[in-house]
């Protein structure tokens, strides 16, 4: 047998590390609730079409990152590379059109076949926020505010820059597309193979290329900004005004495009310089055409996703969990009584550590190891009197407490 290893690009989250993970999810859950977003989840896999139709045939995700397979029934399936397409599919197939705006928060694992490196994995986790059914710039401002508040609570906002750009409407894009194709055609020899393949289908994608040759062509490439229709310009200006009004700082970056093809109007990224090339922690934008592409009625929408692992690496240490008390029974009768007491205390919300076996020394060592705040010592003498000796493990003080008032005494 070959040696047993986790799959490349996957990682375990062990108990020591899990509180950092949980802190990110719980912070996002709490902040999104304050803004009126309801939590939901969708399946980890969907028919391949759900992603192929929406992410765009020229996106990295569809060109080379999807984990696709045929199941035993012959259906082409894909492990979700992102949440938005699945949530939109769920919105349509569950008839949520009567329920607008549909404001949701979700989190869970995503799968992309990428070259693993720090902050880039094949199974990773995302937070996700979507507002479906609102064309108003106020919705864009709100989703950005949710993101900013989550980053702020995690202690990261000061280290992040909000980059924002308008990807315009279809009319703006069509006008820009022509000049952009001409520009890249004039330098076709310097374009990467991937970008040559994208050129006729979606030249804007080249702005998101990680190839150095492609990147060298970008400073002189014609920008979409110069081709925005007056309507698209006004929509973008309204988003920026909204951000100004609530005091969220941003940097308009006319080179910003997004990794997936479905974005229109405001697209944005919160970027930090603390993670090298993997500096984008939270990214999203408006995707007014996506639901129609999936077969639903035209419905405007906006949202974002954030990489939980990237946030975990940056966030401050989470608050420690409440400390348990350790029960220390001595002898068989006390051990049996301890099981009853432990269950009673736990049912009253007190965390209890109770070893399956061991003498006093061993049990007290264990109590130290789990950082117990108190040891509840139960010997034959105590049992006979109906009391326990409760030792404060920080102060070293010890006193007797009647068993029937243990929960009360330990609740402090
Ligand atoms: P990148 O340019 O870094 O490849 P992307 O544009 O592909 O990112 P999105 O599809 O917008 O990323 O995903 C949103 C967020 O999810 C990213 O900003 C990042 O924080 C996180 N993310 C994306 N891919 C990975 C991955 N392979 N491993 C860990 N986190 C990821
Ligand atoms: Mg990517």
Image: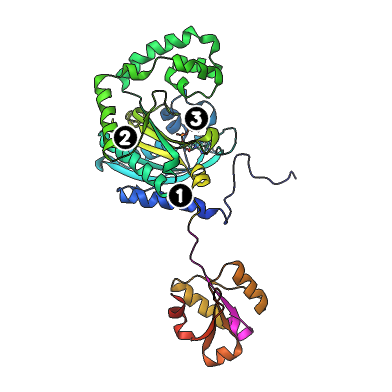
**Which of the two residues, 153 or 97, is positioned nearer the viewer here?**
153
Residue that appears at 55% across and 9% down: 189
Q: Which residue is mark 2?
A: 301
Residue 202 in view (yes/no): no
In the rendered structure, does residue 335 fall within the stretch colored magenta? Answer: yes
Residue in the picture at 51% in, 55% down: 19
User: How far is disc 2 from disc 3 in space, using C-alphas?
Assistant: 21 Å
Where's residue 33, x and y in %? 33, 51
Q: Quadrant of the C terminus?
A: bottom left
Which type of secondary structure does the marked residue at label 3 adopt? helix
Q: Is residue 340 above or below residue 381?
A: above
* Residue 364 position within the rendered picture, expressed as x and y whole percent measured from the top left: 62, 75
Query: In x, y percent, where is residue 361?
Result: 67, 77
Task: Answer whether residue 372 is magenta in the image.
Answer: no
* Figure quadrant of the N terminus: top right
Q: Are marks 2 and 1 in contact (CB under 8 Å)?
A: no
- Residue at 57%, 67% (x, y): give it: 371
- Indicate yes or no: mark 3 CB to ligand 1 under 8 Å: yes
Q: Is residue 261 left or right of residue 7?
A: left
The span picked out in magenta is 319-336
| Disc 1 element | helix
Q: Which residue is mark 3?
A: 61
């Amino acid at each position: 047998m070959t040696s047993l290893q986790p799959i490349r690009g996957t990682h375990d989250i062990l108990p020591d590390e899990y509180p950092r993970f949980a802190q990110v999810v719980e912070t996002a859950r709490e902040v999104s609730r304050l803004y009126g977003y309801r939590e939901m989840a969708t399946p980890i896999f969907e028919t391949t079409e759900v992603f192929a139709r929406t992410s765009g045939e020229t996106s990295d995700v569809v060109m080379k990152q999807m984990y696709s397979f045929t199941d035993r029934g012959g259906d082409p399936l894909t492990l979700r590379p992102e949440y938005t397409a699945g949530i939109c599919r769920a919105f349509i197939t569950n008839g949520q059109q009567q329920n607008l705006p549909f404001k949701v928060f979700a989190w869970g694992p995503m799968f992309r076949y990428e070259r693993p490196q720090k902050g880039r994995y094949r199974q990773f986790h995302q937070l996700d926020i979507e507002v479906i059914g609102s064309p108003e710039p106020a919705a864009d401002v709100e989703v950005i505010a949710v993101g900013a508040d989550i980053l702020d609570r995690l202690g990261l906002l000061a280290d992040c820059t909000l980059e924002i750009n308008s990807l315009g409407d279809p009319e703006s894009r069509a006008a820009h597309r022509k000049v952009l194709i001409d520009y890249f055609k004039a330098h076709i020899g310097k374009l990467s193979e991937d970008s040559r393949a994208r050129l006729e289908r979606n030249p804007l994608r080249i702005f998101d290329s990680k190839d150095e040759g492609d990147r060298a062509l970008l400073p002189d490439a014609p920008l979409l900004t110069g081709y925005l229709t007056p309507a698209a310009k006004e929509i973008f200006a309204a988003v920026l005004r909204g951000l100004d009004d609530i005091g969220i700082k941003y940097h308009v970056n006319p080179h910003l495009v997004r990794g997936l093809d479905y974005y229109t109007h405001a697209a944005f990224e919160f970027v930090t310089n603390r993670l090298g090339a993997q500096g984008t922690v939270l990214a999203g934008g408006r995707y007014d055409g996506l639901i129609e592409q999936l077969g639903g009625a035209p419905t405007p929408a906006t949202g974002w996703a954030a990489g939980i692992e990237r946030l975990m690496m940056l966030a401050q240490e989470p608050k420690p969990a409440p400390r348990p008390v350790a029960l220390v029974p001595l002898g068989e009768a006390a051990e049996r009584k301890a099981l009853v007491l432990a269950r009673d205390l736990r049912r009253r919300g007190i965390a209890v550590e109770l070893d399956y076996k061991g003498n006093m020394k061993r049990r007290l060592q264990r109590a130290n190891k789990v950082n117990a705040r108190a040891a509840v010592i139960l010997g034959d003498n105590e049992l006979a009197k109906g009391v326990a000796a409760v030792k404060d493990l920080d102060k070293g003080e010890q006193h007797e407490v009647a068993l029937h008032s243990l929960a009360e005494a330990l609740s402090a």
